[in-house]
Image (spheres, rainbow, N blue to C red):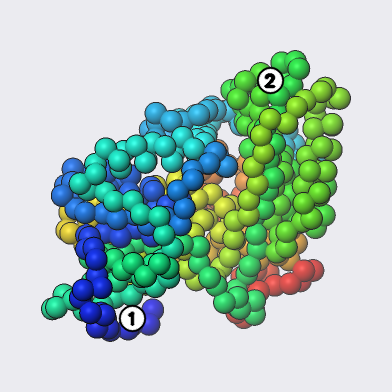
Amino acid sequence: MPRPPAPSAPPEESALIRDYDYLIVGGGAAGLSLAYHISQEPRLAGKRVVLVEPEESPRNDRTWRFWSDEPSPYEAIIAHQWNHMMFRTPQLTRRIALGQYRYRMLRSLDFYQLVYRTLDERPTQFVRLVGRVTGLQEVLSGSQARVLATLADGTQLQARYAFDSRLPKLAPDPRRHLYLQQHFVGWEIETDEDTFDVSTMQFMDFDIEQHQQVRFVYSLPFSPRRALVEFTVFSPELLAPAEYDEALRQYLTQHLSGQRYRITGRESGSIPMTSHPLPARVSARILNLGTRAGRAKPSTGYTFARIQRHSAHLVAALAASGHPPANPTTDQWQFPLFDTLLLDIMQRRGESVRDIFQQLFTRNPVERIFRFLDERTTPLENLQIMNSVTPWPFLRSIWHLVRRRPGQRGE
């Protein structure tokens, strides 16, 4: 990692209108999670925190899902949880008990409201500002290094440490790195008759046409008559908007056997899935959060639980030593390698990923798969995972990685 530039001198001191211990840029899942974790740490109760958000208009525009074998920091607002999952391909249909795990879902509006309420109850500790940060740099303030943030309206803020959760602006280099998107559209539907098993969520239904990509549907039942059904694609390019709706209509026609349903809600999104380096630290006093810090797992897109572990790690270090940890994420080298290999397979032969996941779920206990996706497996468990899948696609991807050129379709 190149040495960060030396702190520059700040503008005239009179321009600095406020000074804080911690500056959090962005109020999405990552920024708000860090703020919430700080609020729950008594040893940081005396620290002043400013949260700068581009807008303050929380909407119920998405849901976050994660699996866990222990209580969540947001247990009070978990909307639903399931103790069984379905996995399906054209050759396999399997209902799997999750054992000690639960697959959980929370709604974005519930999360926003909980965090805002918690921060507003601590007005001497937390300040929330609406604005857009246009500049973020280390400066020298007297004899101390600080972080200076400049907002679009000219406001300037100074803090000991800054945590930046803005979406990264990458300069793509497709000759060296992989760039895919996980894109999806989900419908919340209501049926006229009891249809869904509320104890069982559909984790991945690969029993749909792949179109040389990775495509599956998953569904989360909320009641016997209500569910979220989501069509997901992993590919370099997005689909035309009508294609997502048509895929959902076809799926529901087939699986509801002609039963009538109503669409009561809708969500959509796109998550970058890339091997492009996303550093968790910019400099000694500026750290990244969320997608900007590589917290969206490249091979699956799951982000929320990784954000919580990252926030807890940062806050524990701040509380214990007063400084961020030397290793901001505790990432282990082998898991990004596994992610890169799977991304390469997705780009070269996306339709083959269905077979890889079928092998994973037929040859491993679900607890081992979840630990692997959480990057908590031991070296022995990693070997067991690797031995459970056909090696040839991964060997081809290793060759592409060695020559430092991502594979292309058909290679």
Percent from the top left, x then y, of residue 50? 29, 55
Specify the amino acid type for callout 1.
Pro
Secondary structure at badge 1 equals loop
Horizontally, residue 385 falls left or right of residue 265, namely left
Determine the residue positioned at 37% across, 70% down. 154
Q: Tell me if I can see residue 101 in this picture.
A: no
Q: Quadrant of the C terminus?
A: bottom right
- Residue furthest to the top: 193
Percent from the top left, x then y, of residue 225? 68, 20
* Residue at image mark 1: 4
Specify the amino acid type for callout 2.
Arg
How many angstroms separate mark 2 from mark 1 (CA)? 56 Å
The answer to which image quadrant residue 12 occupies is: bottom left
Residue 294 or 21: which is nearer the viewer? 21
> What's the mark number on residue 225?
2
Horizontally, residue 272 falls left or right of residue 154, namely right
Task: Note whether 193 is above or below 242 in the view shown.
Answer: above
The answer to which image quadrant residue 201 occupies is: top right
